[in-house]
Image: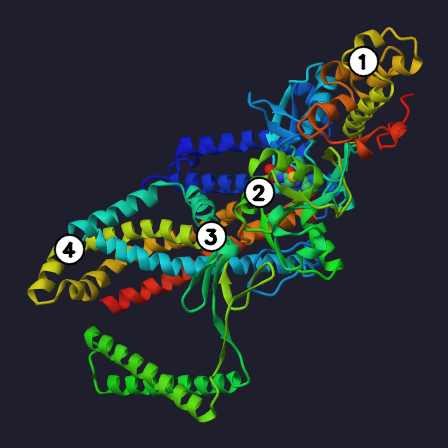
Amino acid sequence: MNAPDPPLHRNPKFLRGAAQAVFALVFVYLVSAMLHNMVVELDKRNLPLGFDFLGQPAGFTISETIIPFDDRSAYGWAFLAGIVNTLQVSGLGIVLATTIGVIVGVSRLSKNFLVRTLATTYVEILRNIPLLVQLIVWYTVVFLNLPPLRRSLSLPGGVQINNRGVYFPWFAANDQTRTWLMVCAVAALTGAVAWWRVERRRRANGAIRTEGRSWAQSWGMAAAWMLGSVAFITAGWALTGQPPFGMDYPVLKGFNFRGGASVSPEFAALLTGLTLYTAAFIAEVVRAGIQAVDKGQGEAAAALGLGRLQSLRHVILPQAMRVIIPPMVNQYLNLTKNSSLAVAIAFPDLVAVGNTIINQSGNAVQMMVLIMGTYLVISLAISWLMNRFNQRFRLAGR
Amino acid sequence: MKRLSGFALALLIVIPLCAAPALAAEPKGILKKVLQRGVLHCGVNGKLSGFGFLDPEGRMTGFDIDICRAVAAALFDDPEKIRYTPLSAPQRFTALQSGEIDLLSRNTTWTISRDSRVGLDFAPVVFYDGQGMMVMSDLGVARIDELDGATICVQTGTTTEKNLTDYFRNRGLSYEPVVTQDYETSVNAFLKGRCDAFTTDRSGLLATKVKYPALADALILDEVMSKEPLAPAVVQGDSQWHDLVSWVIYGLIEAEELGVTSANVAQKRESTDLNIRRLLGVEDTFGEDLGVTNDFIYRIIRHVGNYGEIYDRHLGRNSPFNLPRGLNDLWTRGGLMYAPPLR
Ligand SMILES: N[C@@H](CCC(=O)N[C@@H](CS)C(=O)NCC(=O)O)C(=O)O
């Protein structure tokens, strides 16, 4: 039979609810107290709390931006330039760190002593030195110590390397370029449509998507497409007597190299530092993931006559992925957040630019909110993307 | 469960008690707070020879440091009662606004935006400066106009970075900036040849040149790009504190004008000159009216010396810079140093 209800002060349901309510109250109180305090203090100092200042001209310059920026642009635009810089370095860093990390992680389990030891040394060194130190070393010891401008290292093909950056030739549009781009776009579109139709037919015919076949097929198709376009461009070039685009070479003019494209030592140092550091952690994640796959799987693959690489590609990695992806998300988030160490080596990421805006405009609170908000959005976006990827993987893998 | 809710209950009672003072944020005034605390929190440079840096014995010294010391002497009769916070250019104003420091004495230019929007109040100017440009002599550049298209190292969070943009824009010149958050990175980049030129206050250029042997034959170009009146700053809206810091500086200047030095200040207390008697607090109650003791200027001069002594010690004839007084001389000798009457 029903036991009599316990008195309120011993009723677990009530107590749990009460504790939560109390906690919520305290939390709300603390937050509002902080907000209130902030508003009072700002008001006392006669400091505004709006975001209008974002429209004011910045009046300072930023070393490098991807989006066009000069000192007459607005504070808000300057901050956006910082965000784009952060995204650029983090995006590239994630791709490169993953590539290197997977290679090193797999090498750590290699049967080859030398490979294994090299990989282990890499991980142990890179993982155990603070990133800030590594960045400063990359910047001041490596990139700033490249030859100075007047003794720039000239590589074949017009590449110039000196301590103001790496300069290389880059495409420049000529009067043919637009036509060519259009032709290429049409070709790519046709290719995509054709691919899609072939796939659909294959599926309809009940083709089983064994990975080996589609792997070989993709390579084949990609190669065919490449060959096709090269042939196409050459033919067109021969017919019109004009190349589809010009090349712009860096040349020393006045104080600096002009023309072509370039990568600054600040960007190079940040990207190198972030990539190599994060790759060490990713290597560990990959190694753990592979080791988590049952030994029998590898043995079974070997028994079926699969080579080591084949078994890695088709048997081990797909299963390891389930273990690898969640901690990998963490590493991606870390890399993105660590990119804020850019302030130490003069790369204008969003924190560096944010700091400058705080200092020049005096709107510390607003900018801190914007900086934190931006990181939150970036982090959530990465997590969301990786979650979707993870789900896909589970379905395809089973 | 019961314990937990007891704990939560305790939190509920305790937290408002803790938060309440923060909420009320008693407008007691910085002066009272500092006197009560017994230590002055001073934000300084920490790396700039002549102005604020660590000497070989590990003590903070320099022109800006002596301003902190003068204020501490006025408050506590002891110039050592200071906690120094070394700040980079972009950190300095936040440190003041957040109350981490009471006084900012760090080669800071007085501008209208800092006085209003950024929320500072400036004490009188202690050093009249201007922005300059430094290049290596082998670059073969003698004037700033010749730097069209050059790469220039500059520090963020400064008037310097804004003056640079204006100066080049007004003359239709272009440049590529390398913007660093701190001074040493900037100097280092310049030394390595990452930049063709390095720009900051001319006093800063000179200090940098003296500090780094590799810059021995660097050239400081003649043009003065801007006005940089350097002044100590306090947070906006506390006029009692602002007044005190201001009169510490006026006291330094007035003492020099009246010939009162650290060597003769004890004697001068016996002087019959009424100006000197008022300055040293023998007569009248200006000190008490400001919230400190009447002999506060006497204390300052005894411990730190007058304005001229401070200048000579760190920047002038007794220093490696041997910088002429120029605009920083007394008004009676053709400079701009001028204190309102102490009466
Ligand atoms: N007076 C200028 C510039 C002051 C400034 O920060 N100058 C630099 C170069 S001399 C500096 O002192 N840097 C030292 C540091 O950040 O450690 C201002 O107030 O904005």
Task: Identify the element where label 3 is drawn.
Answer: loop
Marks 4 and 2 share the same chain = no
Classed neighbour count for the residue bearing mark 3: other residues with Cα under 10 Å, few (<14), some (14–19), many (≥20): some
How far across and down, in percent of the image, does residue A17 sit?
A: 45, 43
Residue placed under numbered mark 1 in the picture: B295
Residue A366: tell me if it is visible.
no
Q: Which residue is mark 3?
A: A147
Which of the chains bears the disc numbered 1? B
Chain containing mark 4: A
Q: Are marks 4 and 2 in contact (CB under 8 Å)?
A: no
The one of A389 and A214 positioned closer to us in this rendering: A214
- Expressed as whole percent of the image width and height from the top left, the position of residue A396 reads 26, 69
| Residue type at numbered disc 2 | Val
* Horizontal arrangement in the rendering, residue B286 relative to residue A318 (left or right): right
Which quarter of the figure is the C terminus of chain A placed in?
Answer: bottom left
Q: Quadrant of residue B338?
A: top right
Residue A294 is labelled as 4
Mark 4 and mark 1 on one chain: no
How far is disc 4 from disc 1 in space, using C-alphas? 84 Å
The spot of residue A146 in percent (x, y) is 45, 51
Q: Which residue is mark 2?
A: B187
Are callouts 2 and 3 both on one chain?
A: no
Q: For marks 1 and 2, give the CA distance.
A: 43 Å
Residue at image point 57% right, 35% down: B213
Q: What residue is shown at x 70% (from left), y 41% (from top)?
A: B201
Q: Secondary structure at mark 1?
A: loop
